[in-house]
Amino acid sequence: MMAWLQLWTTGLMAIVSVALAAAGDSGLRAAEGHEEIVKKESHPVLFRQKRDWIWNSLYVEEEKPAPVAYKIGQLKSSQMVDVKSFKIEGEGANTIFTVDHKGDLFVTRSLDREEKNAYHLTAKMYDGNNKLIEDSGEFLVQVTDINDNTPVFTGTYNRSITERSTIGTKVVEVRATDADDPTTANAELRYSLIPNGDISPFGIDSITGAISCKTNTLDRETKSQYVLVVKAQDMRGMASGSTSTTSVTITVADANDNIASFTRKTYELLVQEDHKLNEKIGTLELEDRDLIQNKEPIFTIPNENEKKVFGVELSSPDKDGDLMLRQALDYETTSSFTFTVQVRENLKNLRFPADNVNSAVTSAQVNVKVLDVDEAPVFSQPVYTFTVVEERLVNNVGTVTARDPDKVNKSIRYSISDKDCPVSINPFTGQLSTLRMLDRELEATHMFQVKAQEEPSGLESFVKVNIIVQDINDNKPELTVDEIFVCENDLTDTVIGTLRAADKDDQPASFSFSLASESSNFSIRDSGNGTADVTVKQGPFSLDDPKDYSVDVRIGDGGRPVQTSVTKLSIKSCRCDARRIPTQCKAGARRMGVSVHALIAILLCILTILVIVILFVMRKRYQKDSLANLKNSGEIHEQLVTYDEEGGGEMDTNGYDVSILSSACHDGSLLRHPDRHPHPDRHPHPSLYAMVQKPPPPHPHHHHAQQQQPTACKGDMAVMIEVKKDEADHDRDGFPYDTLHIYGYEGPESLAGSLSSLGSSSTGSNLDYDFLNDWGPRFRTLAELYGVDAPDYYHQY
């Protein structure tokens, strides 16, 4: 095997070139239907040079049926050797293409050029000993094309063109493809439009497929869409060529090529007279065949008067005309309006022939009827301002006037809602007057609102009124001065202080200063500029002098009328150093003038106190008169029992006479002593007055005092008072007693006990009240209330 490889390598370097050439002439190819491939001799052996192979391409017609393999050529060698076999390698070798021992090349199946248009093969020759004679080069088998494919469009087309476009405007370029050989007529296409409806506005380039407009009168309002059918045909458009079609939809886009015009010649609109400004009254409808985006009307109102009252704006989104109100309406003045409104297109974007521009303006008549509305009263002025002189009652400050703007012209009633307003108004005339005198210094301006209402209870309006209080010279000047002192060693004409004044009035004041009374020590020197100097008239002074120094200063304000005030100015006397700085002073009271308002306040306080005192005294007098009436009853016990005062000091002596108790003690008929036996001639019933004793408090001294039983005789009152005093001094829990009758002394022998509630308990008592019948007719009702059936006896005084 190694020897064979060496021999083969040497043979390759020395072999003569072999070429496959096509055999026979044209007549032979026509008869045999194949071509011969010839291998030609080249250089002598042992010289390795490039061989010049000459190959003729082999051709196979596509789609040719091959029920039996058919010959397309022959492989030949120029060497005179006995070639026994051939072998081919490459694309489709031994499957699509086969070779026999003679070198004939056959095709075994039908081929498709669009699938594969060429096959690359190589051939080798062997001798009878199966020895490689020649390694051939590559040869090519080409598949020839036939028109077996039709044109194909990628899809449908949708394009648009603006109406009124110029001639030659390109719309779209259609394109079709053909799978056949593009170098042959099989794939060379031609385009055309198939008549299908109105295709006259458009044309197509047969080679490029570009569709363009052939007219400049495209009108969207007439026809807004065109559907074209495009045909593509191969074989350069010959009748034998294959065809294909597609549709092209062309939409005509809108342009502003139509004028806007009113839909009616006359528009009737209603509007209320209180319609708000810059708001729509109604709509003026327009007709424009163009789309909304190309609807560009411009409105004008030729009449200048109506142009001030009305305006027209574009409505949204219809772009009609909205009539707007620019000026307030008044039914009573003008109840209707009639005017003309014109409309035209925006010429900037209008696609019109020049002779049609003037016809782009239309006009319509607009009739506006104003409706009456009940309106609130209208004041003659937006704000009223009046001036009133202070400190005067003015009956006619000014007049506020309002009217009913309606034709009914109802009467107006005026009022002021502010209760604290110092000004009143006449409800029928609107005349203002002051209720009290105004003081500019308290309030310089009064502001309030006046209401005007249609009678009886109609609409109402309000207006602001300003009352400016005019100043008069009604305030006295007031002294303003720093602390003034005089030194012991001040000499004559020494300035000890400067006087100034202030005035509450608004008028400019020219103050003048002078002495209201002659002073032996001081004088006032008016500077003329609203100030004055206090100077020493006669000195020196002594700090030990008990006399206080003062001057009465009279100030005039120079107004009309002139207001003056007198103020006592106190001057301190001091001991000063060399620089007139006080080191020790004796204070002097500085008394200034008291204002009128302070005096009024003081008088009101005094008057209030006097009224309270008078009422208190009258109440006391009434109570004393009631007690005095009781004395006429003739019974001592009634006076003591009904008296309910709990202390009044020495004034209790006016309520009753204490001497009656003493007389009762001297008489002896009304008193019964417990240490005495009853007289046989006396009546056995108890005394009218039982002795009232206070429950003994837990105090040791009180017990001692209680052991001393007072006797109902002369001096009995004094003993009782001493006992009570002793109890009050040592009993911390007892009540303070300051009058005699509060002790409840009603006689030492009284069985009724005390009528005072101080010593009684809160619970009921089992006491028999039959003794009340002995007290006289006045106590009979009280005895019956406590269950006494009938009195046994009555005691008459």
Image: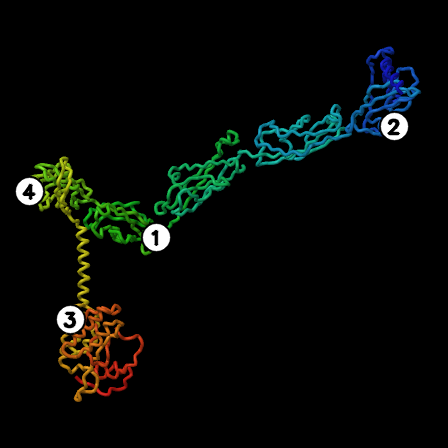
Amino acid carrying label 1: it is: Leu
Give me the C-alpha separation between circle 3 and circle 1: 75 Å
Q: Who is closer to the viewer here, 116 or 556?
A: 556
Of badges 2 and 4, nearer the viewer stands 4
Residue 316 shown left or right of residue 171 in the figure = left
Callout 2 crowding tier (Cα within 10 Å): few <14, some 14–19, many ≥20: some
Of badges 3 and 2, nearer the viewer stands 3
Number of labels in the image equals: 4
Which mark is first along the chain, 4 or 3? 4
Callout 1 crowding tier (Cα within 10 Å): few <14, some 14–19, many ≥20: some
Are the two marked residues, 2 and 1, in contact with CB atoms closer than 8 angstroms?
no
Q: Which residue is mark 1?
A: 459
Of badges 4 and 1, nearer the viewer stands 4
Amino acid carrying label 2: it is: Ala
Q: Who is closer to the viewer here, 353 or 1?
A: 1
Which mark is first along the chain, 1 or 3? 1
Q: Which residue is mark 2?
A: 69
Residue 520's label in the rendered image is: 4
Residue 653's label in the rendered image is: 3
Give me the C-alpha separation between circle 3 and circle 4: 60 Å
Callout 3 crowding tier (Cα within 10 Å): few <14, some 14–19, many ≥20: few
